[in-house]
Image (cartoon, rainbow, N blue to C red):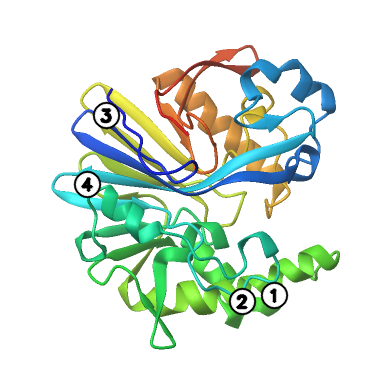
Amino acid sequence: METRRSGPYGRGVNNFQLGEVEISRVIEWQGEFGPARHLVPDSPPELWRDNEPALAPDHWLPGTDTCRGAIQTWVLRSEGRVILVDTGLGNDRDRPQNPLFDHLTTGYLDQLAEAGVRPQDVDTVVNTHLHTDHVGWNTMLRDGEWVPTFPNATYLIHRADHDFYDPRNAHRRRAPRDDQERLRQEGDLLVHADSIAPILGQAVLWEDDHRIDGNLSLEHTPGHTPGSAILHLSSGTDRAVFVGDVLHSPVQIFQPDHSSCFCENPREAATTRRRVLERAADTGELVVPAHFAGASAVEIAREGAHFTITGWAPLTS
């Protein structure tokens, strides 16, 4: 497995090969997400302390009890096609619900070019779900209008997520429990307007499972959002699973019952997480989360009712 890194810190591109599929990792942003028990609310302090060797410093800073993470896109070249898994944050977006990502200006398209990808080259965009940090570069601002960034691509979105975040169905969502949830729901409307609605003419709304090609398939894995999905790679003897936000931190590998603060249905998310990790451990799938910083892709094994990390893919930050 070969890798390379270029560009400044947090703006790297890594390449590696699994079977006949070439994979590039394009990091749009990398840094501190916030307090550990804000990101994973039910996780006890000792869970982090006991697993410090695996968590620090790439994923957790013990001195400040802060989580680190990344916003990134996985570029897959398979059977002559270019597939993007999630599209990051995007530029020029009004994100009052998350000041850290409000009106960003990043060099994302330059980073894609460094990975050898022009917007017109992309055949398929997979949105594992419709949160703001997974759909941002679906579109770009041109002459004051949001237009698809990838003009020749089919955008794959699970129908359950489309229906859940469709503004016409806003009345079906539960009333916000606090100001934070109210801001998040208001932010979802902005995300839909600038990153989802403009690409619906190029979108396929899939249900159940969906095969992309002979190497790649999508599985519906609800919990984080109603339409959350993961992507399985099976090529030759190599296996991987791109799990989106099934995992936010490696601490959830050690204790899968703890869901993130962003999960719409934490109990369902925990059930899904355990099932995905069990399959990965049993079949030898490399686990590739959306938000891990550092090496990012991880090998796991079962240890009773829990899981252990047995290795990391040789990727750099």
Label 2 crowd bin: few (<14), some (14–19), many (20+), radius 10 Å: some
SS at mark 4 in the image: loop
Q: Say the numbered circle drawn on residue 186.
A: 1
Q: Closer to the camera, 231 or 137? A: 137
Whether tag 4 and tag 2 are in contact, CB under 8 A, the answer is no
Q: On the picture, is 41 further left or further right than 239?
A: right
Choose the circle earlier in sequence order: 2 or 3: 3
Contact between marks 2 and 1 (CB within 8 A): the answer is yes
- Kind of residue indicated by mark 4: Asp
- SS for callout 3: strand
Tell me what residue is drawn at x 66 percent, y 77 percent. Answer: 170
SS label for mark 2 = helix
Q: Looking at the rendered structure, which numbered label has been put on residue 189?
A: 2
Report the front residue among 158 and 6. Answer: 6
What's the amino acid at mark 2?
A: Leu
For residue 158, say whether it is visible. Answer: yes
Mark 1, other Cα within 10 Å: few <14 / some 14–19 / many ≥20: some
Q: Which residue is mark 4?
A: 213
Q: Indicate the position of residue 277 as horizontal and vertical percent values.
A: 53, 28
Task: Nearest to the eye among marks 4 and 1: give it.
Answer: 1
